[in-house]
């Protein structure tokens, strides 16, 4: 899962929080402190919630990536090839025929102007693909992009969370406690909402970990279920039609007055394409469902369980009624 997919999980919590906070600010706190101050208080809690969501999503994603990179190294995506394929060459005749067409150029050159433009663009793409290590670096580059995305949100949201929550929300709470006041409705809803989201996420991740443990204990070998699975976009070696465009370059090089370098480049592509197919169909490692589950759910539990405990215990402590102030039992 990419970072933005992880971040999207928290969007419902943010949306619910925004609506609830403004309703409480206008209906409840507005009576005590005025509409302007109440809306400001709601804004501070909303920003705190959004920044916390960014921090949690970034932390979970970075932990998952770390677990997959260094601990559960077989936790891979079964639908993502280890390396990207060499860029395909699609000629204009492909669309006219309703599918890939192989030019033979037995009598004359069958390339049109659009085909030559496509070939020119393809040469640039193929050169870039080779410079990137023949696609082997694509997965690594995508992983680095996701790390950069997560770190970017972490770096930006951390100081904002510190300012709005630690300085403003917690600062106001300390003043209220010193004055003997109970937490307001916004603070209570904020803490219980975060605690609820953390609890649900922790329960789901714990249940999935228990499910994985039971599968292993009962010897339900789920890892073998993907052993015969092949990447959906890859055809069997030798019968693929994705290479028709480049084969057309080889067949038509003489009649279309293409250079020897163009013919050699096309032949190199055919070798690279064949090697890529063999790598992704024959030798691509079978992902481990067990390790994938552990790598995904352990970070969730490590982040969401403390999140729930802190917010739940904090607000329970702040709203607890002192024993001395409890009503005396009725006398008979």
Image (cartoon, helix red, strand yellow):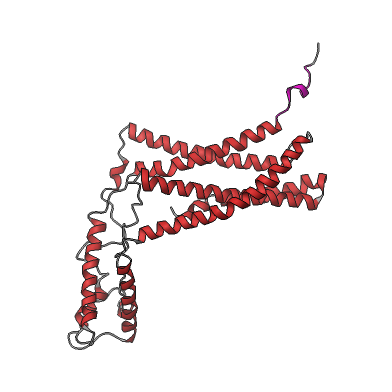
* 313 left or right of 99 in image: right
Image coords of residue 96 (percent x, y): 32, 79
207 versus 98 height, above or below: above
Image coords of residue 271 (percent x, y): 21, 68
Q: Main secondary structure of the magenta part?
A: loop
Q: How many marks?
A: 0
Is 176 or 80 nearer to us in this picture?
Answer: 176
* 300 left or right of 314 in image: left
196 versus 52 height, above or below: above
Tell me where the magenta segment starts and ends, as one range.
Answer: 320-329
- Give the quadrant of the C terminus: top right
Q: Is residue 25 visible?
A: yes
Residue drawn 57% across and 38% down? 308
> Furthest residue to the top?
332
Image coords of residue 283 (percent x, y): 23, 54
Q: Is residue 326 magenta?
A: yes
User: In which quadrant of the rendered view does residue 319 lie?
Assistant: top right
Residue drawn 65% across and 52% down? 47
Residue drawn 58% across and 35% down? 309
97 versus 275 height, above or below: below
User: In which quadrant of the rendered view does residue 208 lie?
Assistant: top left
User: In which quadrant of the rendered view does residue 114 lie?
Assistant: bottom left
Q: Is residue 294 magenta?
A: no
Q: Is residue 181 visible?
A: no
Residue drawn 33% across and 52% down? 78
> Furthest residue to the left?
106
* 132 left or right of 257 in image: right
Image coords of residue 247 (percent x, y): 22, 75
């Amino acid at each position: 899962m990419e970072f933005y997919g992880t971040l999207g999980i928290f969007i419902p919590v943010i949306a619910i929080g925004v609506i609830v906070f403004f309703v409480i600010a206008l209906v409840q706190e507005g009576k005590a402190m005025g509409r302007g101050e109440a809306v400001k208080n709601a804004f501070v809690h909303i920003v705190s919630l959004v920044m916390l969501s960014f921090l949690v999503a970034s932390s979970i994603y970075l932990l998952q990536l770390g677990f997959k990179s260094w601990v559960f190294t077989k936790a891979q995506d079964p639908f993502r090839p280890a390396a990207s394929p060499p860029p395909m060459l699609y000629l204009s005749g492909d669309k006219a025929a309703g599918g890939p067409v192989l030019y033979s150029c037995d009598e004359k050159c069958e390339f049109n102007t659009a085909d030559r433009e496509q070939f020119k663009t393809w040469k640039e793409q193929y050169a870039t693909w080779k410079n990137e290590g023949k696609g082997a670096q694509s997965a690594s580059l995508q992983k680095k992009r996701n790390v950069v995305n997560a770190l970017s949100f972490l770096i930006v949201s951390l100081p904002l969370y510190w300012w709005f929550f630690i300085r403003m929300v917690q600062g106001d709470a300390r003043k209220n406690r010193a004055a003997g006041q109970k937490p307001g409705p916004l603070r209570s809803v904020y803490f219980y909402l975060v605690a609820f989201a953390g609890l649900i996420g922790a329960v789901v991740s714990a249940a999935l970990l228990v499910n994985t443990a039971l599968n292993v204990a009962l010897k339900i070998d789920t890892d073998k279920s993907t052993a015969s699975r092949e990447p959906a976009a890859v055809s069997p070696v030798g019968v693929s039609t994705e290479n028709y465009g480049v084969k057309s370059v080889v067949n038509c090089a003489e009649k279309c007055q293409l250079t020897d370098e163009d013919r050699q480049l096309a032949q190199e592509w055919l070798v690279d394409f064949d090697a890529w197919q063999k790598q992704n169909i024959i030798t691509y490692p079978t992902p481990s469902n067990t390790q994938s589950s552990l790598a995904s759910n352990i970070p969730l539990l490590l982040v969401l369980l403390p999140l729930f405990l802190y917010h739940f215990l904090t607000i329970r402590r702040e709203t607890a009624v002192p024993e001395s102030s409890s009503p005396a039992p009725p006398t008979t």
